[in-house]
């Protein structure tokens, strides 16, 4: 990425750049962009044409605020792919999806009005925010629209502002889009995440960032192995049970004999597939006890393993190097390489 527009980006030295063949990328032409949207997101060509028309019209309306200081201020290509990736039936829903993605990023009312004006003129529809964010819409199935049921028993008062927040967050998470909540303290940012986790019956993993937050606080790290004696007793007990089921005559009398007996059982070749997998798992646990340190997953990794909701609070206090570690998680693939685990 070019320096200046991104935090921490610097100009590479000429000696380093001379070792590469530099390739500069220009903006994608409008016709090619329509083709990419239609084929990648499987939408109608008419939808793709109008989405790209909104994109180019917003590029022309550069605003003076810092958020919209560049031609990519209103919308980027990532926004277009998110817009096209949302299932829309008709231009009305297509326009509402675009409004949620583009206009709701704006902090100033005139910027939001400009986005709304462009979408309405190109889509030839009218957008009514009060109806769009209402949880009692008679024309649609709200639970299917949001991707989650509306929680019945909560302490939340469903004001129009809270309904708007819940709708925006639920729609984004339904399509696996990460959400950045920006607002003053007490505006309901954390509350709406708690309401969503309650509605979907998912556990909410939270982490409050501070100036000394490290990558290990997010993804986990190596810690000293604890309760070694207790773990040895548990592995010995499980091993005795499995070996008795296999009918082997050689049973361990102490924990020191367990390693050789499990190894011989694996080499015997007379085990069933079930017992083979069980003894292999016990042998792996036994080898882990020989190490001094063991890996403990952080809240982010735990949430990814179990498919839960992860809330990173006060994210603006964390260092850029920590946040850069999240880039692969925020991609559609949702992957994370734990190089620290070894």
Image: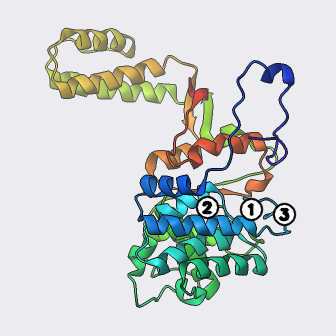
Q: In this view, does 336 lie to the left or right of 231?
A: right
Q: Disc 1 on helix, strand or loop?
A: loop
Rendered-image quadrant of the C terminus: top right
Residue 177 seen by the camera: no
Q: Do the residues labelled 3 and 2 touch (CB within 8 Å)?
A: no
For label 1, count other residues whose C-alpha is less than 10 Å away and answer few (under 14), some (14-19) or many (20+): some
Residue 338 seen by the camera: yes
Q: Disc 3 on helix, strand or loop?
A: loop
**Where 7 sits versus 154, above or below?**
above
Rendered-image quadrant of the N terminus: top right
Residue ID for mark 2:
179
Q: Specify the quadrant of the image occupied by residue 325.
A: top right
Residue 61 in percent (x, y) is at 76, 70
Q: Specify the quadrant of the image occupied by residue 201.
A: bottom left
> Which residue is at a point 58% across and 20% down the rendered structure image?
292
Residues 36 and 264: in front is 36
Residue 242 in percent (x, y) is at 23, 26
Say whether disc 2 or disc 1 marks the residue closer to the N-terminus: 1
Q: Which one is in front in this view, the residue at disc 1 or the one at disc 3?
A: 1
Residue ID for mark 3:
66
> Which residue is at a point 69% across and 68% down the rendered structure image?
58
For label 3, count other residues whose C-alpha is less than 10 Å away and answer few (under 14), some (14-19) or many (20+): few
Say whether disc 1 or disc 3 marks the residue closer to the N-terminus: 3
For label 2, count other residues whose C-alpha is less than 10 Å away and answer few (under 14), some (14-19) or many (20+): few
> Which residue is at a point 69% across and 32% down the rendered structure image?
23
Residue 15 in percent (x, y) is at 84, 19
Residue 43 in percent (x, y) is at 42, 62
Residues 82 and 285: in front is 82
Q: Are marks 1 and 3 in contact (CB under 8 Å)?
A: no
Residue ID for mark 1:
73
Q: Is residue 214 left or right of residue 258?
A: right
Q: Is residue 270 left or right of residue 279?
A: left
């Amino acid at each position: 990425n070019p320096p200046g527009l991104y935090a921490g980006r610097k100009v590479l030295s000429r000696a380093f750049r001379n070792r590469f063949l530099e390739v500069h990328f220009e903006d994608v032409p409008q016709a090619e962009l329509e083709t990419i949207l239609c084929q990648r997101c499987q939408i109608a060509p008419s939808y793709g044409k109008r989405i790209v028309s909104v994109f180019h019209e917003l590029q022309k309306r550069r605003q003076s605020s810092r958020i919209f200081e560049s031609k990519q201020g209103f919308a980027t290509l990532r926004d277009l792919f998110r817009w096209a990736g949302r299932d829309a039936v008709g231009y009305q829903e297509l326009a509402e999806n675009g409004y949620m993605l583009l206009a709701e990023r704006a902090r100033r009312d005139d910027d939001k009005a400009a986005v709304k004006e462009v979408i309405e003129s190109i889509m030839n529809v009218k957008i009514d925010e009060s109806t769009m964010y209402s949880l009692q819409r008679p024309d649609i199935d709200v639970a299917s629209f949001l991707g989650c049921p509306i929680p019945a028993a909560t302490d939340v008062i469903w004001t129009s502002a809270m309904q708007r927040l819940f709708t925006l967050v639920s729609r984004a998470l339904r399509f696996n889009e990460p959400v950045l909540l920006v607002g003053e303290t007490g505006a309901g940012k954390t509350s709406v995440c708690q309401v969503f986790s309650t509605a979907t019956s998912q556990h909410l993993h939270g982490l409050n960032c501070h100036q000394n937050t490290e990558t290990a606080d997010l993804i986990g790290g190596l810690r000293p192995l604890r309760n070694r004696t207790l773990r040895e007793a548990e592995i010995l007990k499980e091993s005795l049970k499995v070996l008795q089921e296999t009918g082997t005559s050689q049973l361990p009398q102490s924990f020191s004999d367990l390693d050789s007996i499990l190894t011989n059982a694996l080499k015997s070749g007379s085990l069933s597939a079930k017992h083979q997998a069980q003894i292999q798992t016990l042998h792996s646990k036994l080898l882990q006890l020989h190490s001094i340190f063991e890996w403990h997953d952080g809240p982010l990794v735990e949430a990814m393993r179990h498919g839960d909701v992860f809330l990173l609070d006060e994210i603006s206090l964390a260092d850029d190097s920590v946040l850069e570690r999240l880039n692969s998680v925020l991609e559609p693939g949702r992957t994370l390489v734990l190089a620290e685990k070894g």
